[in-house]
Amino acid sequence: MRVMFAASEAMPLVKTGGLADVVGALPKALAKLGAEVTVVLPKYETIPQEIAEAAKTIAVTEVQLGWRRQYCGIQEVVVDGVRFLLIDNEFYFKRGQLYGYGDEAERFVFFSVAVLEMLDKLGRMPDILHCHDWQTGIIPFLLKTRYANRPGYRNIRTVYTIHNLQYQGVFSRELLQELLTTGDDSFTEDSLEFYGAASCMKGGLRFADKLSTVSFTYAREIQSEEYGEKLDGVIRQRSHDLWGILNGIDTEVYNPMTDPNLAVNYRDSLEKKRRNKLALQRELGLPEDAGVPLIGIVSRLTQQKGFDLIAEALSELLKERIQLVVLGSGEPGIEDMLRGALPANRDKMAIWFGFNEGLARRIYAASDLYLMPSRFEPCGLSQLIALRYRSVPIVRETGGLKDTVAPYNEYTGTGNGFTFGPPTAHDMLYTIRRALSFYGDAEHWERIVANGAKNDYGWESSAELYCKLYRELVS
Ligand code: ADP
């Protein structure tokens, strides 16, 4: 089976969040099951130089966007056994960041059309074109409309995976109509139209042959008004085509036994894990104390991740005997909130603003507890990485957090973490205090950590489900 992934980020080339982890790891797991997977990405400036230099141009084409014809180079590079194709256009992608520009619609419509134009040039069509998130939602739409009668394209089946329903790529109808050179019929309610504007995400939801999202609970939640981001009706209509398939992590990449970023490599030894805590405390200027419970957070700083609860609970939390380490970047208001707490708590709190893969790993390794009070969470990889590094997650019961973290039950000895339901600072604080009380009891603590170690959250079983989904489509 030939599978092509189209996405806006993938490890180890470019990453801003969990999407990159998934698009980086799933192809390797699918390859082990016999699928031939290629990943198509924009050729961003931030791709590591050695990879960018190794990429060879294999074809050149042009992409029609409205009245403009734009250059499109197609480059090929193999990284860790995965074949990547890079869509090269310096005007759109040679920029300092992946996202956040005024011409986002144009950049990703260009990318979407380029992926489809490229297929003709490559000659061999994929059986499955697997698209991810709003940046590629226009691809299933185009395949069912403009490309429907183009020879070779008819047998391609599409899967569209929702990694986060909140980011939808909604633009003015005039803009998308101009970029796509389509008539009014594309902007009806059962097409791209979205409350008077146009939605790229809806292109994927309406036109892909199958839909998937990244946990069972999120698959159910997004069909409700509360979590549906105004697309719940569209998703409900397609509920029979929607699969919830839990994300895994690349257990070779996230491996505390071999991770070169750590002070001390370990598997299950809590003593060695504590040496990583001491090293991180030294690195961040915190008092060196192997016994103090260290709570870690590695996250985009957005409201989704429950930072309003953290803001409300922070001063109370910092009265506990803990250390709190936060690594993240995002909304300035959240940065200000964290920065504001720092001067009075320098012996208890350290913050690092920005993206830092090495430090992230050291925080997972050093922390005893990992806090993730998300308001919603499609899957969440951070809690899985935390578990892999033997850090105990404290999470809100939503989406993939609910599917992967089971609350510790001191009577039955089951559970790999601590969870709370209502999204309130009070419930979060209560749950953190409960976790801290068990931290003080070695027998309970070792059991909780050992429960977390029973599953390494690799990709094997989920990759099999994706294969099953693909097989249903091609048979
Ligand atoms: P999301 O995709 O919503 O951001 P996930 O938990 O699914 O959340 O995935 C986040 C991924 O990004 C994890 O691998 C996490 O370690 C990483 N990450 C988030 N923020 C940072 C940061 N500031 N520096 C390094 N890694 C980060």
Image (spheres, rainbow, N blue to C red):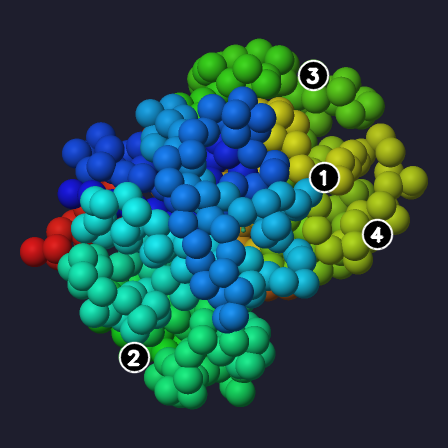
The residue mark sitting in front, 4 or 3, is 4
Q: Label 1 is placed on what type of residue? A: Gly
C-alpha gap between disc 3 and disc 1? 20 Å
Task: Give the structural element (helix, strand or loop) at label 4.
Answer: helix
C-alpha gap between disc 4 and disc 3? 27 Å
Q: Residue 303: where, in percent of width, then height?
A: 66, 60
Q: Which residue is denoted by mark 2 in the rendering?
A: 237
Q: Which residue is denoted by mark 1 in the rendering?
A: 354
Asked if residue 338 can be seen in this view, the reply is yes
Question: 32 and 424: which one is in front?
Answer: 32
Please give the name of the residue rendered at 41% of the width and 84% of the height, measured from the top-left corner: 183
Q: Label 3 is placed on what type of residue? A: Ala
**How dense is the environment of label 1, judged by Cα within 10 Å: few (below 14), some, or many (20 and up)?**
few
Q: Label 4 is placed on what type of residue? A: Asp
**How dense is the environment of label 2, judged by Cα within 10 Å: few (below 14), some, or many (20 and up)?**
few
State yes or no: Cβ of the residue under disc 1 lies below 8 Å from any atom of ligand 1. yes
Q: Quadrant of ligand 1?
A: top right
Please give the name of the residue rendered at 54% of the width and 38% of the height, measured from the top-left corner: 14
Q: Which residue is denoted by mark 3 in the rendering?
A: 279
Question: 251 and 411: which one is in front?
Answer: 251
The residue mark sitting in front, 2 or 3, is 2
- Quadrant of the snapshot with the N terminus: top left
Instruction: Indicate whether 42 appears above or below 451.
Output: below
Q: Residue 444: where, in percent of width, then height?
A: 49, 31
Whether label 2 touches label 3, CB < 8 Å? no
Q: Residue 469: where, in percent of width, then height?
A: 19, 54
State yes or no: Cβ of the residue under disc 3 lies below 8 Å from any atom of ligand 1. no
